Image (cartoon, coloured by chain):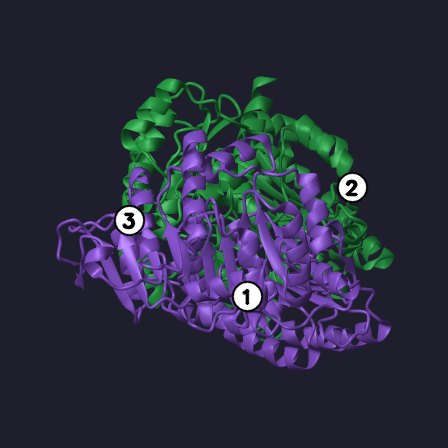
Chain colours: A green, B purple
Amino acid sequence: MAKNTIEEIEALFHPQHIAAFGVSATAGKLGNLLLQSFIDLGFEGELIPIHPTASEIMGLKAYPNLDAYGNSIDLAIISLHPSKVFDAIKECVEKEAKGIVVFSSGFSEQGAEGKKLEEEIVEYARSRGTRIIGPNCMGLYSPASRIAFFPGLPSETTGEVGFISQSGSLSVNLAFDAALKGIFFSKMISVGNSADLTLTDFLEYLGEDPQTKIIACYVEGIKDGQRFVKVAREVSKKKPIIIWKVGETAGGKRAAHSHTGSMGGDSVIWNIITNQAGIISVQNLNELINHIAAFSHPYLPKGNRVVILSGPGGPAVSSADACEKGGLTLAPITDETKLALAQILPEYGTSVGNPVDLSLTSALNPALHYQAGEIVGKDPNVDMLLFFISVIPKSVIKGLLKMQEQMKKPIAIVCPIDLLVSWEGNIARHIKTLFNSLDPKKGAEYLQKLNQNGISVYLTEQDAVKALAALWKYQHFLQQL
Amino acid sequence: MAKNTIEEIEALFHPQHIAAFGVSATAGKLGNLLLQSFIDLGFEGELIPIHPTASEIMGLKAYPNLDAYGNSIDLAIISLHPSKVFDAIKECVEKEAKGIVVFSSGFSEQGAEGKKLEEEIVEYARSRGTRIIGPNCMGLYSPASRIAFFPGLPSETTGEVGFISQSGSLSVNLAFDAALKGIFFSKMISVGNSADLTLTDFLEYLGEDPQTKIIACYVEGIKDGQRFVKVAREVSKKKPIIIWKVGETAGGKRAAHSHTGSMGGDSVIWNIITNQAGIISVQNLNELINHIAAFSHPYLPKGNRVVILSGPGGPAVSSADACEKGGLTLAPITDETKLALAQILPEYGTSVGNPVDLSLTSALNPALHYQAGEIVGKDPNVDMLLFFISVIPKSVIKGLLKMQEQMKKPIAIVCPIDLLVSWEGNIARHIKTLFNSLDPKKGAEYLQKLNQNGISVYLTEQDAVKALAALWKYQHFLQQL
């Protein structure tokens, strides 16, 4: 990609004048939803609704067309019937739009005729210096620029995650769901059919973007395979890339094609690509969020040796299985470590091997978790720690954070109760009484603090192991450069 | 198992006089925790704390020994140092105890000496008509009998799930976590080292128990393999058995051995066993709860053909992959179904194939989920339905329940936001405003109602597919009898 494409994309993230086509005078249309998104985020530039008759829409001055508006624009959002899209694009190009988000569907994903129209539009716009995002996409979200593609998206400007997606609604899901876990985004791009600007273009852009420290993608099919691998490998050297790739099976491929006109690739080839380019692969929204959480911190493991610490013995055994199945090994802790553990653990019902079995005593004395963690964390044979904690009291979170100040090793916590669960009701009251649990309002805040200190929380031991293995895989990729 | 073992176990679930050894006068010991468990559940019989000097403990009259108490007892709970356990057992046997829960650890899981002591204890007690549960276990929980092994356990007596576990603390986790999802238990048995009464004994018992409709187990190793397979196969014909088996890898086997002295089996052999006996296998606590939820309902699928309905296109594609990888097929919906779908879905941005892509429109008009569901549910080519719903409004839950009254097919919902998540805070307010979301206090209640109507909710598409595939596997097992 020539340097100027990066510059062109950067400009799209800083529009001053945005025209919106396909907005209803009476609200309730998708175009109004898009307009509301900008209003909700406090966009400081000019929003220009285009409507044949209305003079005002959602409190904004409306125009019948861009000629009536008169000035040039930076960006346009088009959510018209596909048959009307080309005319609107011509208007925007006349007004020197730097980019146009084509929200409308009905193009290459619908067959040969749609594909032809899509190609004509792109050829027309590009030859006149205007870039197209989409069609069949939701466009751009950037809290710092106060631009968005769905009402009420998080306005936090501290996010360091860039997300590129071939599914628009999924981006909305991710933005909300991740926020509930204390994860925010620098930039999101919904590329749709990516008829002009492709996923690879945006990947290269985010690779250069100083706001973005981690890149995540949802991918149905890649058009420019060779260039993608080259770009991804270069970007991976600087920041981790986490990709949720779908369309691996025959049924998935058909579904991907009718969704964004993508041709899904072979899963064997995809595995080769991810290894070459140091890409972290995930397979659902939950794993995508988990892996972003794991990569939010600065500590990469020196090896693949894990120590497991658990109150209940069952999950300890299960975690040992998960580690060995997931490509990690159980750290052979030293005799010195075992002796030190024996000093703080009860004689019976516990185990000072690996897994370290903290027994039911840890429910009565939750400090055992971080006290034992501190001992094993110092062991030179231990690269990563995996805790199973049934319910996490605030005191344990504080203890783990303090412990990590010295340790600086990746830590995964498996907790079967979501930190965000509401504690209302009878059962929850008991749990709260017994374990001095978290205020749920603080859940996302604590999760954010944990993530930023190399401690991430998972629902299952398999989830935790997969994320720890990904940290090790990425470290290994960097070491082999 | 002779009929009288079942009767013996049944008697253990209806004790009138329970002695507790290892209770501290000043509280804070594990023995006191066990005593508190009975008090919390409102046990109506007599609790008899045994203590060398105290005359009252936790408001209960205490005795220095059972001779001082004088009468016979039904059950005893022993949480003494292992060196003192045998003497206490002798006291209990003298007083004609029907059963003794040996909470204490320090037996076969600690090596040859502990194993010898364990064998001596069992031989002594059994020869005198007293059954042992454990050692290294937590014993029995039954809300209907008001007996329990942890303070504050749910007191709901409507549960139809029986659980047998080689991990005690895990049972506590499961009881609390499942309750948050509206799932309750008829009986729980923590068997520990199972030196006398084994997992197989309790499996046969629960097979006969009219309160229990579903059986779940956590297993580290099985001592009486051949009998287990025979019993499991017979029980499976009457009710589904869901088993979380650990100790499959070398590290997991070592961990299981130091936990309950179990010898983990070969995973290939385990697969053969589960197929022969119609057992449903799961691999973590979350899957265990998911599968209990799936089997809470009475509709088993007629085949393995799934239809996928989703708002966001990404998860639709991913769900198609998950189905085909997980042994299910995408239902070939009829042209009639496609025509009917086309009547209610917008022309562009949607897809009337399988997956059915409901597009972002479904966020504005959530009724589309159950309206489209009703159409595809009538299709004779469809055996099961898988919905992806970003945030589930109350109206959709009601619509799905109404739809299911006619349909009676297994339905899985993938929802990336936990129904129990607290909606406090800025982001959540937006979600609530937009989607008219559930009151979190009602979360568990709704989940229970959904489960009881053959609709279960999962975090990921892979979780949903695994549970739907298990329903089909069990149906297949029943058909082949």
If you read the primary sequence from the N terminus, does the residue marked by circle 2 or circle 1 appear first?
1
**Nearer the observer, B155 or B47:** B47
Q: In the figure, B195 relative to B414: above or below?
A: above
Q: Name the residue under label 3.
A: B30
- Asked if the residue at tag 1 contacts the one at tag 3, i.e. Cβ–Cβ closer than 8 Å, the answer is no
Q: Foreground mark, 2 or 1?
A: 2
**Nearer the observer, B137 or A379:** B137
* Mark 1 chain: A
| Residue B388 shows up from this direction | no
Q: Name the residue under label 1.
A: A33
Q: Which mark is residue A335?
A: none
Q: Are discs 3 and 2 both within one chain?
A: no
Quadrant of the frame with the C terminus of chain A: top right
Q: Alpha carbon of mark 3 to alpha carbon of mark 2: how far?
A: 57 Å
**What is the three-letter code of the residue carrying label 2?**
Gly
Badge 3 crowding class, 10 Å Cα cut-off, few under 14, some 14 to 19, many 20 or more, is many
* Mark 3 chain: B
Q: Alpha carbon of mark 2 to alpha carbon of mark 1: how far?
A: 34 Å
* Mark 2 chain: A
- Asked if the residue at tag 2 contacts the one at tag 3, i.e. Cβ–Cβ closer than 8 Å, the answer is no
| Residue at figure coordinates x 35%, y 18% from the top left | A336
| Residue at figure coordinates x 67%, y 37% from the top left | A200
Q: In this view, does A104 lie to the left or right of B422?
A: right
x and y percentages locating residue B416 in the rendered image: 54, 57
Q: Residue A265 carries which label?
A: 2
x and y percentages locating residue B387 in the rendered image: 65, 65
Q: Foreground mark, 3 or 2?
A: 3
x and y percentages locating residue B381 in the rendered image: 82, 69
Q: In the figure, B161 relative to A420: above or below?
A: below
**What is the three-letter code of the residue carrying label 3?**
Leu
| Residue at figure coordinates x 62%, y 39% from the top left | B265
